[in-house]
Image (cartoon, helix red, strand yellow):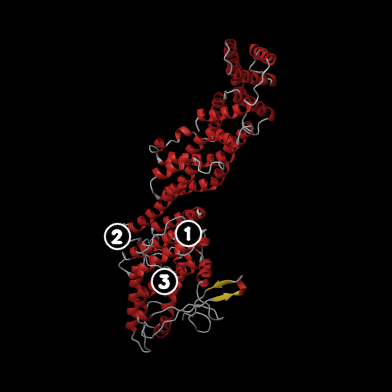
Amino acid sequence: MSTTTLSSTLSSSASLRLNRNTSYHSTRVADSIISVHSFISRWDPQTSVSSGFLRATTHLHSYLLHAARSTSRSAHHELIRTNFILQSAMSRLDQELKNHLMSITDAHSTPEAISTVRSIVETMISTGYGEECLSTYQSIRRSAVTSQLTEFGFDLSTYLPKNLRKLKWDKLEIMIKSWIDAAPVAFRSIFSNERQLSDRIFGSSSVSVRNAVFESIVCDTATKLLSFPESVAIHVRHSPEKLFQLLNVYGALSDILPDIESVFKSFPASEVQQKAISSLTKLSDAVQGTLSDMEKAIQKNRVKPRVAAPGGALLPLTRCMMNYLISLSDYEHSLNAIESNMTPDPTKYNSFSFEPSDNLHGSPASISIARLLLVLIQKLESKAESYRDNSLSYLFLTNNVNYMINKVETSRLNNILGEEWVVAHMSKVRRYVEGHLRSGWASVYAALPVKEKEAVDRIQRFETIFQKVLKEREGWVVVDAAMREEIRLLVEAMVVPPYSSWYRAYQGNATVRFSPHDLAQQIAMLYEGLNSGSSSGSGSAKFIRRFGRYLRRKSTDYSVRYQIENEEAQSSKLSLQYQTRYDTGHHGELSFRYQIKRGNSVQYI
């Protein structure tokens, strides 16, 4: 509301009160003139205005209105003289108002200071000087509000949209952090206190007047403050590294929205509330756009070099995305709010192949994160095709999806995605491991002697194939230490026990070079990769507990056996059967062991 419009409202309100009394006494007017003259002649800026002076100026204004209705020549001269005196009095009062307002910080200032300012304001309004009063009040209180914001490092002049377009991201980040610090203080403290102060000082005026005074001081500043998030949403590019700052701003604005509505509750369609809603909408659109662009970026990620990752190791994209999603999980509340307001797009997932475990019916945040994980797994599966060896493709998928599961389980993602997601993807890892063993080790198993009287050259052929396979797998890696040990034991269980029975028959032959122990030692050196320091993991115990937990429990006899079905040992008929054992003597942990039974233990002869 403009100063002129508001002052007219104030003046008309005052006139209604003053015009009720039309009888004035000359003695009273003369006394008022003397009182005003005395105050003006002896005015000291350090001395508070007296109540007598305020009453005198009110009497003069009443007389002025009375004289204005007279048509006599003497009344005209009195009118001019009284008006001159009244103007001088108002000039002094305006200065008094400035002095006292400068000593007031907020609504919690001393009652005496607030009472004095209220008296001056009421006198100036009642004597027809509402415009001058309001202009002074607005000027000083606007400066006070701006000064308080500046104390929090927020300078409105630097936050104009035209300035933001030219800023580099690092500078804009600093401004975003400054805004996040300043906005809650502004609406919960500065603006709220300003509301209380204007209500106290203009308490004798109508509610509409009090609202108008407050809005004229704060509305412009509040609107500019709320324009910043909208400008950030519009001018910031949809890039993954900027998503978190968008969510930070969205969260901060969402948190103070009830405070905005409370402070501006008398303005149901106010510009301030509209700007807050507009900024939230723009931020929401920017977040959704960034998530959508991220999906596209994952899908378009090119394989460089031709092989996805040497030795089937972790893809940098996997590590980067999981760390990113863990950080994103901290914004679950904001994601739920943003995605819940999103208009469903039935064509969005047409290119995806879903499974029940993909968790596309949970909370909005879980759906968004599960969708990104789904896109990542599909990208990993396409990158796995870059390997010429199917066994290495399965190993690559084992490493990357197992890494994803580890990250989910040890972060907030576990609560968001739920146990079902973890169980289902552990099953995927188990299938990848089985695929790796079938395609990578079935040929070795098939080379083992299968008849009672097998020639020595059959064992020699097996040894040659075994050495060749070991050579081919020199650079292969299993990143997680626990998973590495599991796969080694699986390979050992496939190869060593059948070889042991034939080794007993031919161990005296000089052409038989390997003992079962030699085979076991060679297998124990596998999957370290070219750089064993690249492996990581939390140890076998953790993996064993976790892996066992997701296998179906059908009996109380618990061990893990690896059974080779079909004596022909064809790779297509090789299968792994898992059972679990619950060991109550070890704090309820699930344990694994591997039995190639001769009694209850593995024996190499």
The residue wearing badge 2 is 306
Taking depth in this image into account, of 366 and 591 the one nearest to the observer is: 366
**Amino acid type, residue under disc 1 in the picture:** Pro
The label nearer to you, 1 versus 2, is: 1
User: Tags 1 and 2 in contact by the CB under 8 Å rule?
Assistant: no
How far apart are the two marked residues, 1 and 3, measured between alpha carbons?
A: 32 Å
Q: CA distance from mark 2 to mark 3?
A: 23 Å
Give, as a three-letter code, the residue at label 3: Val
Q: Earlier in the sequence, mark 2 or mark 3?
A: 2
Is residue 134 placed above or below 505 in the rendered structure? above
Observer-nearest of 252 and 106: 106
Residue 398: % across, % down:
41, 67
Residue 297 percent across, percent down from the top left: 35, 55
Image height of 194 relative to 508, above or below: above
Residue type at mark 2: give it: Arg
Using the rendered image of the protein, determine whether residue 103 is visible from the camera's viewpoint.
Answer: no
Q: Which mark is residue 446?
A: none
Nearer to us in this view, 295 or 494: 295
Q: Which residue is mark 3?
A: 433
Please state the horizontal and vertical placement of residue 309, each as a whole percent of the image. 35, 60
Which disc number belongs to residue 364?
A: 1
Q: Secondary structure at mark 2?
A: loop
Q: Write the residue at 58% across / 44% down.
A: 262
Quadrant of the image occupied by residue 235 = top left
